[in-house]
Image (cartoon, rainbow, N blue to C red):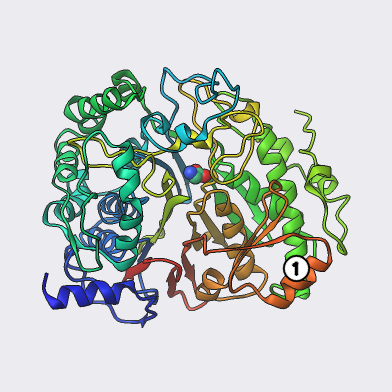
Amino acid sequence: MSLLMKTIARFASLSFLLLASVQLLQAQPNGFQYQLVKHAEYNKAAVSSAHPLASEAGMYVMQQGGNAVDAAIATQWALAVVYPTAGNIGGGGFMVAHLKGGKNVTIDYREMAPGKATENMYVDATTGKANTRLSQSGHLASGVPGTPAGLFASLKYAKLPMKKLIQPAIDLAEKGFVITEREANRLNNLQQQLERVNTSLPVFYREKKWQAGDTLIQTDLANTLKRIRDKGQAGFYEGETADLIVNEMERGGGIISKADLKNYKAIERTPVVFMYKGYEIISMPPPSSGGILIHQMLKMLENRPLASYGFQTAKSVQLITEVERRAYADRAEHLGDPDYYKVPMKGLVAPAYLQQRMADYDSTKASVSSNIKPGVIKESMETTHLSVMDTEGNAVSVTTTLNGGYGSKVVVGGAGFFLNNEMDDFSVQPGVPNMFGAIGGEANAIAPGKRMLSSMTPTVVLKNNKPFMVVGTPGGTTIITSVLQSIVNVVDYNMNAFDAVNKPKFHHQWQPDEVRVEKDFPLDVRKQLEAMGYKIVESGAWSATEMILVKPNGKLEVVGDKRGDDSVAGW
Ligand code: GLY
């Protein structure tokens, strides 16, 4: 490793802020020469994602004639290589797009429970208690991956062949790339778990500590990606890759079968679309809870003078917290896979219902979650996000996930990719919290073929029928409140994208009954909230928001969250 490369990787690990205004034509991403660009302004097109090389892959294919969907696909393949903690082919996700002709598209490629899954598969027969260790790591934790099927379903809206879109990822896997300090730290923290759950030790495992500037070459993953390039979707869900996945399952006691893989389908869903203060919000419907909760929360806020309360004052934070509490109570009761459970989509966002939900709101004191029941309806952490806008007027928002960092921690032997631990996003037993502390019941109970409830909230916002903002973030259950606050920061508080993304976030999810705040959340506001009866819990950063915002002069302000190696590209 040359000193230059090490320097680049160390440099890349800094939260480096650069306001770039000029951008040369993008070459193919080079794993040994890259840097973080946190904040930039572009004239035509932009990508923001969790890794500079992935954003560059997206920009590269746009400059080869692709549109924003091409860029989103290429960025996602590249993330599967350069961001193994969450970028994935062994996980699932959602795409929300507003296309240049005005059509809104949402594609659901959430993982699904294997055919042999049962409602009580994690409940210990002797103790009667759920064993969440099994739903969170190891072979039994994985749902059937959806990401490859989702990227092929997205191709319908792209312009270039998949062979071109996947090639940058193949090259990065085959030739390698230098890892950042954050990635080195994450891999060092992973070693024991890799040893515990894997049937053969993967390339991510080594005795010596990983360091910034080390090269990661992923030959098995490159070969898997080549099979996908050469055989299409069947290169993952059938043939050699399917054999490798099923063999891995058999060695490690998992239950994903060849039939599960062959039968997996991405599904186009009807988007959640609603107006907030003159802006049109387009987001993801169930099996994500994101779109419905964003709809509920923004509508509960819409008729209250949030801006006049001031940004992150006790009054505004308290109001948003109470709105979040009520929406998350509904999430626990009413939301699940709509193909398996009748989610009361209309009832949950009916104006009269939402007004009644806030009827007991008291602006002087904290509500108590045990007194806030889910509404009665008469008729529903580690993830990664990418945002893209192109020169044609397409806006694409994609969030995908392995669930926890590096998913189940199981790497498919010979195929080189991590499998998800998404089964933990089901309600493994009524009232038992998942890894994000969320609880649920029948709506989100496990059933074969069912998709687990998600919080992923890829969102596009229109102003005057044109793309205005593309936004989304990882963060488990905090995703929805981070997206909510990012939108409110721009629409109500008139912030630019940089501040909207990087200002401290806070989060309430009904249960546990506490307000989580980031370290830099204002101390005086925290004290005032405590005096009103709120329990405040300080927590490390949880979001990694990627935002593109169209400025009044038509330029694109593009931001990669300061909290990670997120980075933007464009021209
Ligand atoms: N695995 C996080 C989510 O889908 O909400």
The answer to which image quadrant residue 481 occupies is bottom right
Q: Amino acid at mark 1?
A: Ser
Return the x and y of residue 310 as percentages of the image width and height: 74, 76
* Element type at mark 1: helix
Q: Is residue 565 visible?
A: yes
In the picture, residue 213 is in which quadrant? Answer: bottom left
In the foreground, 167 or 116: 116
**Residue 339 image position (x, y, % from top left):** 54, 25
Instruction: Name the residue: 82% across, 50% down.
Output: 368
* Disc 1 residue: CB within 8 Å of ligand 1: no
Q: Residues within 10 Å of mark 1 (few under 14, many from 20)?
A: some
Q: Is residue 13 above or below residue 372?
A: below
Pick the front one: 538 or 484 = 538
Q: Position of residue 277 (x, y in %)?
A: 69, 62
**Residue at x 55% of width, y 36% of height:** 453
The residue closer to the viewer here, 466 or 529, is: 529
**Please, is residue 102 above or below residue 527 in the view?**
above
Mark 1 lies on residue:
316
Quadrant (top left/top right/bottom left/bottom right) for the N terminus: bottom left
Is residue 365 toward the left or the right of residue 173 in the image?
Answer: right
Q: Considering the image in quadrants, where does the C terminus appear?
A: bottom left
Is 409 displayed left or right of 135 in the figure? left
